Image (tube, helix red, strand yellow):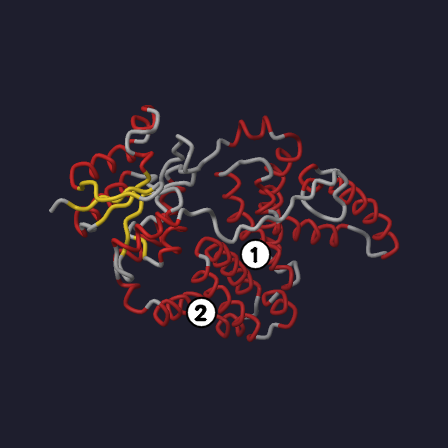
């Protein structure tokens, strides 16, 4: 909105507001902020190409505004932490995981199995972005287009950034979470291509709106979701999820063996819930450490130790800080099917460390407490 107003009025305050919001967005949500950052600079570069010489010098200082805004917010809220190695490792960790293929879903099989709509969107979205960037960008450089239309090219750059999520995670309907720039550009081009006659526009747009509405109300996902148009009457009952079931014996076990401000080492499906109920802090850096499963099921859903580096850090923290007590669900102590201990090597390593360095202390209903030997 700020860039659109700037393209129409050429007032510096709108460009300044856009730069400030871009810098704040990088601080608030790093990945989306970076895409906005690229879109903002695409707008700024095209604007400087198309502007008069006086305006080029006048607006050039805005180039540094997003970066300065981000650094200022970091300095004010994070203080000296921004100069630490751990902070930057945390910021870049998930980017590294994505670049290494963590959670990736192959694109080609997805296009073969997800139907016509997914395939059309997977091809159409980047195509619309690229054509918009090429057409509007070249028109602006050649000074054959209005300045307010630069925004469409910037939206194309932003859309390409967002679209990488669908490329990596090509799941059914995955394009829904990255399609807003696409919708914006489709509306933009419809407005430019259609006749200036308002009556003709209405005649063309009404059938399109009707088709979209019919497609919406026929969508199984839309119909299954609770709403007044839910013809299947499949309204899900609202359940009280305020607090999961936690045995009082296990909560008292944690409270009795630990201090109020102590970081507590809990290896449980409901680690977070136990910590909240017992009013204790988490020991594990990657908390919650394991994915939730039922107490009574002989099942294990895996851990958040997706890489060898994460496992090494967890084991290093255990060895360095040496927590006095280690709470673990008893079912994990060789009560799971053998295949879990061979498949989940991180589970086996943690259990082996526990047996080597801790001894049994007491038990609750599901949790067993172990105290450190040394």
Residue 242 is left or right of residue 286, and the answer is right
Look at 31% across and 69% down and name the residue there: 79
The count of marks equals 2
The residue labelled by disc 1 is 154
Crowd band around label 1 with a 10 angstrom C-alpha radius: few (<14), some (14–19), many (20+): many
Q: Residue at x 28, y 68 (%)?
A: 80
Give whichever of 337, 148 is nearer the camera.
337
Instruction: For mark 2, give the secondary structure.
Output: helix
Residue at 66%, 50% in the rendered image: 183
Question: Among all residues in the image, which is located at the extreme right?
Answer: 199
- Residue 117, label in figure: none
* Residue under pointer 2: 65
The mark nearer the N terminus, 1 or 2, is 2
Q: Residue 15: x, y in percent?
A: 54, 70
Residue ID at (47%, 70%): 62
22 horizontally vs 153: left or right: left
Compute the Cα span from label 1 to label 2. Answer: 17 Å
- Proximity of marks 1 and 2: CB atoms separated by less than 8 Å: no
Of residue 227 and residue 338, the one placed in the foreground of this image is 338
Q: In which quadrant of the rendered image does the N terminus lie?
A: bottom right
């Amino acid at each position: 909105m700020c860039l659109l107003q700037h393209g129409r009025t050429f007032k510096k305050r709108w460009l300044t507001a856009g730069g400030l919001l871009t810098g704040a967005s990088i601080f608030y949500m790093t990945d989306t902020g970076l895409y906005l950052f690229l879109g903002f600079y695409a707008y700024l570069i095209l604007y400087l190409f198309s502007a008069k010489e006086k305006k080029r010098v006048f607006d050039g200082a805005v180039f540094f505004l997003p970066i300065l805004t981000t650094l200022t917010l970091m300095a004010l809220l994070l203080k000296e932490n921004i100069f630490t190695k751990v902070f930057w490792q945390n910021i870049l960790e998930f980017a590294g995981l994505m670049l290494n293929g963590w959670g990736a879903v192959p694109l080609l099989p997805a296009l073969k199995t997800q139907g016509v709509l997914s395939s059309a969107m997977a091809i159409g979205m980047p195509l619309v972005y690229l054509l918009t960037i090429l057409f509007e960008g070249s028109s602006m450089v050649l000074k054959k287009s209005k300045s307010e239309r630069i925004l469409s090219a910037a939206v194309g750059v932003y859309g390409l950034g967002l679209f990488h999520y669908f490329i990596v995670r090509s799941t059914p309907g995955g394009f829904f979470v990255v399609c807003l720039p696409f919708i914006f550009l489709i509306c933009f081009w419809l407005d430019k291509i259609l006749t200036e006659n308002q009556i003709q526009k209405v005649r063309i747009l009404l059938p399109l709106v009707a088709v979209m509405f019919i497609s919406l109300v026929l969508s199984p996902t839309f119909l299954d979701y609770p709403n007044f148009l839910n013809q299947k009457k499949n309204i899900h009952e609202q359940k009280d999820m305020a607090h999961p079931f936690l045995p009082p014996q296990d909560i008292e076990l944690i409270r009795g063996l630990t201090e109020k401000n102590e970081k507590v080492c809990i290896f449980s499906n409901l680690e977070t819930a136990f910590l909240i109920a017992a009013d204790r802090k988490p020991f594990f850096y990657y908390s919650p450490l394991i994915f939730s499963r039922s107490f009574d099921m002989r099942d294990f859903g895996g851990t958040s130790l997706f890489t060898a580096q994460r496992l090494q850090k967890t084991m290093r923290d255990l060895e360095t800080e040496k927590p006095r007590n280690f709470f673990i669900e008893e079912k994990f102590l060789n009560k799971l099917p053998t295949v879990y201990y061979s498949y989940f090597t991180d589970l086996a390593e943690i259990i082996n460390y526990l047996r080597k360095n801790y001894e049994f202390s007491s038990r609750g209903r599901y949790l067993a407490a172990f105290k450190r030997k040394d």
